[in-house]
Image: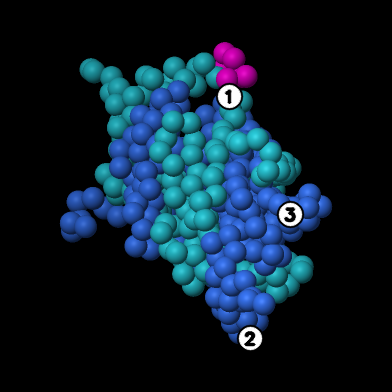
Chain colours: A blue, B cyan
């Protein structure tokens, strides 16, 4: 019997090799991710990682932007939802579950009072985020529910959002009258 | 003397009207943001908010993807960095500070041991994120440092990452042999 080597568009052997590499050398599991943000004008910005095309981010006109793109709150939900989807594809493949269709709807609540300078105290960020995963598969419902539980528990971005992360920052001021950049 | 009505590409009067609306009706500050993720194949996904074009997200080949776009960890940094940049543009304008140039470099650390199924316990997400803001402005250094402190304290996405958010999820399983979707 032939061993199935591709499932959900993933090369199972290649994935096993990656994880085996992490197992033999745990330092390889320690990853650093980067992006660079360039302010354009108003609320228009791009972010760029590695050699990928810059991604535009703006604010809706209701918040004073030009609505040329999604805003950071929506992009954060995009990061969360795509991480969960990737976890689904990966862990389904590892369990022999074929996904026929997968879509996620995410929504969350932000009180803009702190951002807008109306209240001093309180949480400026998302208080609650709700995720609804829609999956089509021939696998038993119990297997898909177990898959869901595993994906949620092990998602890097869900855990980033659900846990407190240590964020440090610094500002470097350069004199505009100094040498051209 | 003419009152300056535009700064950093922003309409100050328009922004004041938005915040005054929140002041008179606090319910308007309560915002809900949404996105929809569609799984394509392998680790390829898009997320889409409102009428904006879908944004592609993938994984690098080193993680088993096809590297067609930034990955969720990079997109999360993009959400954080663009939120901070928007906060800079807004609060600088409100303080009469003209920004000549603004760029942010973000990086963060993720141990992929939990995601890869190598360790049961531990944090699957970012442990630390570092932000370096480079700003060019004629404003005094002290004013820019005070601006930075304010932006960091009031950023919706920085607070989302730095604080624990209540994330709830559900999975809806549909039978692929049922009616067409």
The residue positioned 51% from the left and 51% from the top of the image is: B40
Which quarter of the figure has residue A62?
Answer: top left
Q: Chain of mark 3?
A: A
- The answer to whether B38 is drawn above or below residue B127 in the figure is above
Question: Where does label 3 land, which residue?
Answer: A139
Q: Residue at x 58, y 20 (%)?
A: B28
Q: Chain of mark 2?
A: A
Q: Is residue A66 in sight in this rendering?
A: yes
Q: Find residue A142 and name its label.
A: none
The residue carrying pointer 1 sits among few (fewer than 14), some (14 to 19) or many (20 or more) residues within 10 Å by Cα, namely many
For label 1, the residue is: B29
Position in image of residue B163 (x %, y %) = 66, 48
Looking at the image, the residue that sits furthest to the top is B24
Residue B151, compared with residue B75, is above or below; it is above
**Residue B120, how many percent across, how many down?**
76, 69
The chain identifier of the residue carrying mark 1 reads: B
Q: Residues within 10 Å of mark 2 (few under 14, many from 20)?
A: few
Magenta residues, start to end: B23-29
Q: Is residue B24 magenta?
A: yes
Instruction: State whether residue B134 appears in this view.
Output: no
Q: Which residue is mark 2?
A: A24
- Figure quadrant of the N terminus of chain B: top left
Q: Quadrant of residue A61?
A: top left
Q: Are marks 3 and 2 on the same chain?
A: yes
Q: Residue at x 61, y 84 (%)?
A: A25
């Amino acid at each position: 019997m032939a061993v199935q080597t591709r499932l959900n568009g993933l090369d199972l052997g290649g994935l096993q090799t990656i994880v085996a590499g992490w197992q033999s050398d745990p330092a390889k599991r320690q990853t650093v991710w980067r992006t660079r943000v360039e302010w354009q004008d108003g609320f228009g910005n791009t972010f760029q990682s590695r050699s990928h095309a810059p991604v535009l981010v703006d604010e809706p006109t209701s918040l004073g932007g030009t609505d040329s793109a999604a805003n950071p709150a929506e992009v954060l939900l995009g990061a969360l939802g795509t991480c969960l989807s990737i976890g689904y594809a990966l862990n389904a493949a590892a369990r022999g579950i074929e996904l026929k269709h997968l879509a996620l709807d995410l929504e969350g609540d932000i009180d803009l009072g702190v951002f807008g300078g109306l209240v001093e105290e309180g949480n400026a960020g998302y208080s609650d985020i709700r995720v609804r995963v829609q999956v089509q598969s021939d696998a038993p419902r119990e297997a898909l529910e177990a898959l869901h539980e595993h994906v949620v528990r092990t998602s890097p971005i869900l855990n980033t959002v659900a846990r407190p992360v240590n964020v440090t920052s610094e500002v470097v001021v350069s004199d505009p009258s100094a040498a051209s950049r």
